Image (cartoon, grey):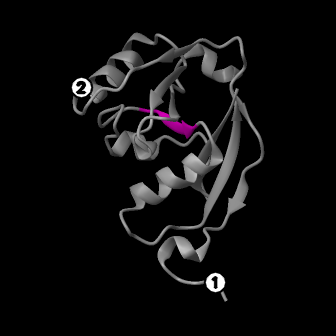
């Protein structure tokens, strides 16, 4: 399975500092997780949503390969903070290296993936070389020349 991660161009695709310092929908503070999206377009949309209108630093998008043999747990929609409790329990119990979760950004019609870098199967997850991503200025209300 191929999934996509948007990250700072200066950061490693599997960097977890952000998730450690900040809670997310599927984890609390202090968790080392990596979020990815089912499609490149969803990774872009999630980045725009989470920017909160702030300037977005130079970004890269990276294809991540999850081998078919790796088990993927699937979670149904859960409101916060219960989703954080669920995700933290999933991490602590080391149930799988990958958790598939619905994306609220597209009304739960597509999925995001939470990766657990501490799970033994995580070492089998690979990635392509990151590609620089330039946001179209129209995302920010400016017409192109």
Q: Is residue 75 above or below residue 80?
A: above
Residue at the spot x=50%, y=15% of the render?
73
Tag 1 secondary structure? loop
Determine which quarter of the picture holds residue 3: top right
Furthest-bottom residue in this view = 145
Horizontal and vertical percent position of residue 42: 55, 47
Q: Are marks 1 and 2 in contact (CB under 8 Å)?
A: no
Q: Which residues are magenta?
A: 32-37
Residue 144 badge: 1
Quadrant where the image shows the N terminus = top right
- Magenta stretch holds residue 34: yes
Between the residue at mark 1 and the residue at mark 2, the CA separation in whole angstroms equals 42 Å
- Residue bearing mark 2: 82
Determine which quarter of the picture holds residue 91: top left
Q: Is residue 142 above or below residue 90?
A: below
The main secondary structure of the magenta stretch is strand
């Amino acid at each position: 399975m191929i999934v996509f991660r948007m990250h700072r161009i200066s950061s490693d695709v599997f960097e977890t500092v952000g998730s450690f310092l900040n809670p997310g929908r599927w984890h609390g503070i202090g968790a080392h997780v990596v979020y990815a999206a089912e499609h490149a377009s969803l990774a872009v949309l999630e980045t725009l949503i989470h920017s909160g209108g702030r300037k977005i630093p130079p970004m890269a998008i990276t294809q991540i390969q999850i081998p078919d043999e790796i088990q993927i747990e699937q979670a149904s929609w859960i409101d916060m903070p219960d989703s954080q409790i669920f995700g933290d329990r999933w991490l602590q119990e080391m149930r799988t290296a990958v958790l598939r979760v619905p994306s609220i950004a597209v009304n739960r019609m597509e999925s995001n993936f939470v990766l657990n870098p501490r799970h033994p199967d995580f070492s089998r997850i690979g990635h392509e070389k990151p590609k620089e991503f330039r946001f179209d200025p129209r995302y920010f209300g400016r017409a192109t020349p």
